[in-house]
Image: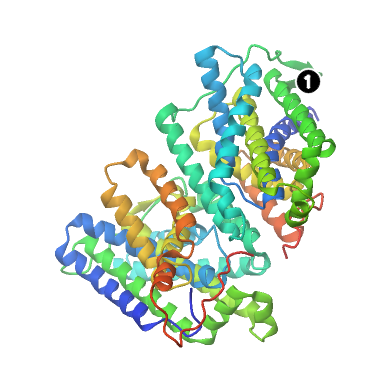
Amino acid sequence: MASVRGVGKVELACAAAIVVGLMLVPVFGSPFSVRVAQQIVLFGGAALAWNLFCGLTGYWSFGHAAYFGIGAFAAGLLEAELAGWPNGAKLVAGCAFGAAVAAVAAALMARPMLRLRGIYFAIGMFCFAEVVGEIVRNFDLFRGTLGITFPAVQVAGLTRLQSSFYIALALFAATIAIHVAMRRARLGIGLICIGQDEDTAGMMGVPTERYKNTAFILSAGLTSVFGALYGHSLGYITAGSVFRTDISLNMIVFAMLGGVSTLLGPILGAIIILVLTQVVLGSLLNMHLLLTGVVLIAIVLAAPEGLVGLAARIRPRRRDAPPPAQSKAAA
Amino acid sequence: MYLLGQTLVDGIILGGIFSLSAVGFSLIFGVLSVVNLAHGMFVVLGGYAALLLRERLGMDPLVAIPLVFAALAILGYGLQVGLIQRVVVGRALVSSMLITFGIALILRNLVATFLTSDVRALNSDLTPSSVQLGQIVVDGARATGLLASLILLVVLALVLGRTRIGRAIRGTAQQGFAASLCGVNVASVYALTFAISAGFAGVSGVIIGLIGPFSPSDEAVWTLNAFVVVVLGGTGSPLGALVGGLVLGLINTLSSQYIGPAFPNIMMFGALLVMLVVRPSGLLGNAFRGTV
């Protein structure tokens, strides 16, 4: 579980090593391994963004795919209007616009949604994602069923796949940096307190409302940029490719497998599940759902605090280590 | 005028079926505080069980209802005792959502692999032909479905309200700990509740199969419908499910008739969001106590 002392040195070093390792994948690996690494960066990054708010506070959103999709569609629709711009500028403008739209959507939803707690918040976000998905599908304005195409962005000297991988990796590293900075600031400490006991935190002077709103909007904005980059990596998307329940669920599963509210958790979870499903079990495609279900049940039963939590329990504690924080996803 | 009448009749019929399909979900949520994401899968499995009985044994779906109920009840009982019970006590609510979602994925994969992933439908020789009331047409199969739903809801209400085991279930829903002090075996009440709920979901799957086609991927739709019914009506009681189901059915038919065929889902989830925010306790006021 997350400590109010900020991200530990070991955890930070591991995260940095993983980023460096991912940077080397295109140098040594095949195009297929770059594809897998790209999935890890995009969906692991989205899980990190989810974790920033949902993991730290214990507000489990089951509908973050809404922001993922909003980012992709807002970016794609804007970029289609920017004829004549260089592709790189289109990408930057599209991502910025996607993040802005998602942030506004999150700001509007924050007031009614964050009043709900525990499972009711989860249900509410789930429905929010369904409503947004249906709206994008059904109004021609958003071209949800028709689909939108994204311009190909290519950095000199790299293939298209490598370019889009490195752009996503940069955002992934930025998300890690934001997580670390936030955990050092009052905001992060306040969010962890909210996760442990919101009412007590409020009584002790944590501005719970403001912190929750800020983190919710930040989390939505980051998720949406990963969505926009996912759109770019595919080149063409419809509403069905981004407004998916399993995208929401993957963010939760990655974080849970690794360890909710830790920095390393969502990253490790993404690496393990994606390597397992894409590489090891790639030939068993018709059993994909079944295996995902088995992994899910196994995690919940065997390691409810995730791998990082498991490691912390096994490793002998230092004398000055803080007492283990009470897990709060229960409401 | 006739159009409005027809829309209302269709809405009520659809609502009755929504109610039956959601009552088990509502019961599990009310008694165990578990959001059962495998619920829709139970509904679909009920349809497939009736289909198997029809194809292999030539049994009429309406006659097969007790068998389907028993089969799903056994499945539900087993899942509760074997898996879900482990996360019900002293664990985060989301763990139960994740574990039931895992079960749904596994079951869906198994159905698609070993039965079929095609869209199928049931038919019965026992349903009457369509009835014409003035200008309003009432489809025979749908009317049978509504009637069966209402009968089953009444039976469930009587079981919960009048029997010893029903009292144990209601007591556990109010406060599990106090019920256990009074000599109720809470774990077995949980398992029984799960069995009854899964059974009702299975039976509603048979009725849904009679009025329209179904496939394994429909499970998400039925889980979501159950969500909406529970939030609209309230948890834990057949009456709440009935009210929620009827409101949902009317929203569904009225919005597709008067706003556009693309709108039922948006209106449904919109209604759910508004309810969560404005009146989280449901129309009957007994759901989601202590939410806000």
Q: Residue B179: image x %, image y %?
A: 77, 52
What amino acid is at disc 1?
Answer: Gln
> Residue at horizontal 44%, vertical 83%?
A181
Residue with the most extreme right position: B162
Q: How many marks?
A: 1
Apparent side of residue A278 relative to residue B231 in the rendered image (left or right): left
Q: Residue A212: image x %, image y %?
A: 60, 75
Helix, strand or loop at disc 1? loop
> Residue at horizontal 56%, vertical 63%?
A60
Looking at the rendering, in which quadrant would you find the C terminus of chain B?
Answer: bottom right
Q: Nearer the viewer, residue B49 or B209?
A: B49
Q: What chain letter is assigned to the residue under label 1?
A: B
Give the class, few, some or many, for how many residues have Cα within 10 Å of label 1's Cα (few <14, many ≥20): few
Instruction: Give above or below for A279 relative to A180.
Output: above
Apparent side of residue A110 relative to residue A302 in the rendered image (left or right): right
The answer to which image quadrant residue B221 occupies is top right
Q: Quickly name the residue at label 1.
A: B135
Instruction: Give above or below for A249 relative to A191.
Output: above
Looking at the rendering, in which quadrant would you find the N terminus of chain B?
Answer: top right
**Does residue A87 appear anywhere in the picture?**
yes
Q: Residue A255: image x %, image y %?
A: 44, 64
The answer to which image quadrant residue A232 occupies is bottom left
The answer to which image quadrant residue A330 occupies is bottom right
Q: Nearer the viewer, residue A104 or A87?
A: A104
Colour setup of the view? rainbow
Apparent side of residue A327 relative to residue A79 in the rendered image (left or right): right
**Does residue A132 appear anywhere in the picture?**
no
> Residue at horizontal 51%, vertical 76%?
A324
